[in-house]
């Protein structure tokens, strides 16, 4: 028989509140464009073959992100075991349609993507935070948690 928790709603609310305070990361496409790089090109160059075929006329960033999210995200080769960590995080955020991801989200996504790897890469909170808080060529930045009133 399953053991009942004391006050499940209070515990769940505490978890949600703790997660809301976690730092989250997004790709700063405005900074990318300001640095003279084409965000659309940067994203299109990461598309899988199926998305590339459908992206012929896609000139808007949001359309490219949707294609990656719908066509590439579930494919094992999109974030393969040999993908460098920074590139893998970039692709994971692209697959999430640039929705802000916490370190925990990133760890979970990469652990799932690399589940067949014999020797797992270091995905510790310390390493990922240090990697993502530095200026990087992927324009990944920390975003402030949104507070609901």
Image: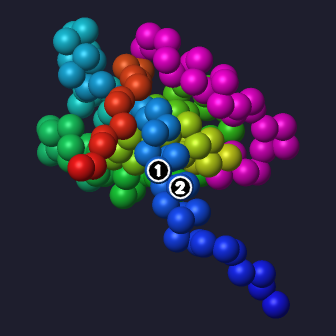
Residue beneath the point at 46% across and 39% down: 21
Q: Which residue bears the numbered disc 1?
A: 17
The foreground one among 26 and 146 is: 146
* Residue at the spot of label 2: 14
Q: Is residue 82 left or right of residue 62?
A: right
Q: Is residue 62 inside the magenta stretch?
A: no
Q: What is the magenta range?
A: 112-137
Quarter of the image with the N terminus in it: bottom right
Tell me the SS state at disc 2: helix
**Percent coordinates x, y for residue 45 in the rendering:** 36, 31
Give the residue furthest to the right: 118
Residue 53 visible to the viewer = no
Residue 69 visible here: yes
Residue 108 in picture, x, y percent from top left: 62, 48
Q: Badge 2, how many Cα within 10 Å: few under 14, some, many 20+?
A: few
Q: Are marks 2 and 1 in contact (CB under 8 Å)?
A: yes
- Is 138 placed left or right of 80 in the picture? left
SS state under label 1 = helix
**What residue is rendered at 60% in x and 72% in y?**
7
Decide if residue 118 is on the left or right side of residue 123: right
The answer to whether 89 is drawn above or below residue 108 in the figure is above
Badge 1, how many Cα within 10 Å: few under 14, some, many 20+?
Answer: few
Which picture quadrant has residue 43?
Answer: top left
Label 2 to label 1, Cα distance in Å? 5 Å
Residue nearest the viewer, comparing 37 with 120 = 120
Q: Position of residue 39 (x, y in %)?
A: 25, 26
Question: Does residue 143 lie above or below 113 as drawn?
Answer: above
Q: Position of residue 24 (x, y in %)?
A: 44, 35
Q: Residue at x 50, y 47 (%)?
A: 19
Q: Residue furthest front?
A: 6
């Amino acid at each position: 028989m399953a053991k009942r928790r004391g006050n499940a709603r209070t515990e769940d609310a505490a978890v949600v509140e703790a997660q809301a305070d976690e730092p989250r990361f997004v790709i700063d496409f405005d900074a990318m464009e300001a640095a003279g790089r084409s965000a659309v090109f940067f994203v299109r160059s990461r598309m899988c073959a199926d998305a590339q075929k459908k992206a012929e006329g896609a000139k808007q960033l949001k359309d490219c992100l949707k294609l990656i999210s719908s066509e590439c995200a579930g494919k094992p080769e999109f974030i393969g075991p040999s993908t460098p960590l920074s590139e893998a995080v970039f692709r994971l955020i692209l697959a999430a349609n640039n929705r802000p991801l916490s370190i925990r989200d990133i760890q979970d996504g990469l652990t799932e993507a690399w589940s067949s790897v014999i020797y797992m890469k270091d995905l510790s909170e310390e390493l990922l935070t240090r990697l993502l808080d530095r200026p990087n060529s992927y324009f990944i930045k920390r975003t402030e948690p949104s507070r609901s009133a």
